[in-house]
Image (spheres, rainbow, N blue to C red):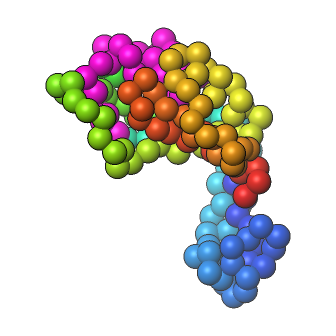
Amino acid sequence: MDVRLPSPGSPGSPGSSGSSGSSGVTDADRELARRISSLAREHEVVSRPAVTTVIELALDTADVAAVGPFWAALLTGDAGALDGDDVVDPTGRMPILWFQHTEPHATPRQRFHLDVWVPHDTAAGRIAAAVAAGGRVVDATQAPSFTVLADAEGNRACVCTMLGR
């Protein structure tokens, strides 16, 4: 595991000068990242960057069976990662996504969507799993930066990578 924070002014760094630059990353932040990386190496901690980190949501739906497998595949890579009304990450690194039962209704304009960040070399597999689980690709014109997907009820999500940004 190696935590890397760019130095101000380095290629790819949002900051251009000073101890914090416009990125808000301070020298103390960089020192903390170096210490974390050192401790991780010392304790043989292995990084798993392909795993989704934090998402907390409840999704209203009138048909869990129609949308559940899509969201399970999108968030965990496994359409079967469902337990009742929940998507459950078998690694325990992601909070549960709970499907709140609602009455059937006309699909309203979506007010939020998920951005699921994955390493670029795993994005195609994650997209394929979500499509195989009942989803569809809505827009891939910005790939590999992001691809917009939708579940069976039209709820959208993006699979995002750092490529092309």
| In the displayed structure image, the side of residue 96 where residue 144 appears, left or right | right
| In the displayed structure image, the side of residue 26 where residue 17 appears, left or right | right
Residue 125 drawn at (x, y percent): 69, 25
Q: Nearer the viewer, residue 9 or 138?
A: 138
Location of residue 138 (image quadrant) = top right
- Eyeballing the image, is 97 above or below 113? above
| In the displayed structure image, the side of residue 70 where residue 119 appears, left or right | right
Q: Quadrant of the C terminus?
A: bottom right
Q: Nearer the viewer, residue 117 or 29?
A: 117
Residue drawn at point x = 57 percent, y = 40 percent: 148
Asked if one can make out residue 42 in the rendered structure from this viewpoint, the answer is no
Location of residue 131 (image quadrant) = top right
Residue drawn at point x = 72 percent, y = 86 percent: 17
Residue situated furthest bottom in the rendering: 18
Q: Nearer the viewer, residue 81 or 61?
A: 61
Location of residue 56 (image quadrant) = top left
Q: Nearer the viewer, residue 113 or 51?
A: 113
- Eyeballing the image, is 6 above or below 55? below
Asked if one can make out residue 29 in the rendered structure from this viewpoint, the answer is yes
| In the displayed structure image, the side of residue 88 where residue 76 appears, left or right | right
- Eyeballing the image, is 33 above or below 1? below
Residue drawn at point x = 26 percent, y = 32 percent: 106
Residue 3 drawn at (x, y percent): 69, 54
Residue drawn at point x = 21 percent, y = 24 percent: 104
Residue 9 drawn at (x, y percent): 78, 79
Q: Which residues are magenta?
A: 57-84
Residue 65 is inside the magenta segment: yes
